[in-house]
Amino acid sequence: AQTVTQSQPEMSVQEAETVTLSCTYDTSENNYYLFWYKQPPSRQMILVIRQEAYKQQNATENRFSVNFQKAAKSFSLKISDSQLGDTAMYFCAFINYFGNEKLTFGTGTRLTIIP
Amino acid sequence: DAGVIQSPRHEVTEMGQEVTLRCKPISGHDYLFWYRQTMMRGLELLIYFNNNVPIDDSGMPEDRFSAKMPNASFSTLKIQPSEPRDSAVYFCASNPQGVGTQYFGPGTRLLVL
């Protein structure tokens, strides 16, 4: 079974700084997707970024980028120039490309941006 | 394009009452997922459908929970009878292919007194 581990339950950073959230996962599969979802206080689950395992290039979306290390099974999220609106829970998630369609979530990291 | 729509957004009920949560997936998405989120257990997949057919309901906690998808644009999650431990946020999500990005609705916050 796949597992996703987020070892940082809480983090805080000053506005405009850069912060990195960690995620590791365990799988025996070679083809899969990895995601970071953001859950602000409104509770909405919002996709931040997605990475296909077969792509060597790290995904980026504006201020958000990932460091995908397939051999190490590591998938960290970097937020540059952090903003107050980035305050949220961040969940790392995994799904196999083949097989069942179940997303496996980590336990989340609560990120607070300090003004 | 409208995203995933869920109703109600908030529900407060008393123990023993029937609760029905509703979801409208994004048009053209063949897969629909129901999740429950609690502080203790995090995000749990309850059940998912492909083309209106339930594929995996192994996450449904008890017989008190049931889900249906009578057509491609509507699904319900029913709890009967409800219990205080069912209090949680229930999310519906959809995607076009099964594997890949799931798009979540705003959730229904359920409180069972």
Image: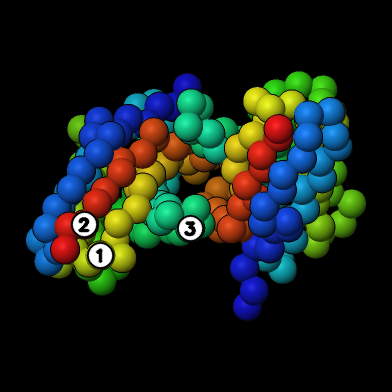
- Answer whether labels 2 and 1 touch (C-beta < 8 Å): yes
Does mark 1 fall on the same chain as mark 2?
A: yes
Q: Chain of mark 3?
A: A
Other-residue count near label 3 (Cα within 10 Å), few / some / many at <14 / 14–19 / ≥20: few
Does mark 3 fall on the same chain as mark 1?
A: yes
Residue at which label 1 appears: A84
Q: Amino acid at mark 1?
A: Leu
Label 1 secondary element: helix
Q: At x 39% / y 35%, what residue is drawn? A: A106
Q: Earlier in the sequence, mark 2 or mark 3?
A: 3
Q: Earlier in the sequence, mark 2 or mark 1?
A: 1
Residue A64 vs B39, above or below: the answer is: below
Can you tell which quarter of the image residue A60 is in? Answer: bottom left
Q: Is residue A109 left or right of residue B15?
A: left
Label 3 secondary element: loop
Can you tell which quarter of the image residue B35 is in? Answer: top right
Locate the C terminus of chain B by quadrant.
top right
- Give the distance between the C-alpha atoms of the residues marked 2 and 1, in whole angstroms: 5 Å
Q: Which mark is residue A42?
A: 3
Seen from the viewer's position, the closer of residues A104 and B108 is: B108
Q: Is residue A35 left or right of residue B16?
A: left
Q: Is residue B30 visible?
A: no
Q: Amino acid at mark 2?
A: Ile
Name the spot of residue B14 as percent of width and height, x first. 78, 34
Name the spot of residue B81 as percent of width and height, x first. 84, 28
Seen from the viewer's position, the closer of residues B23 and A84 is: A84
Q: At x 12% / y 66%, what residue is drawn? A: A16
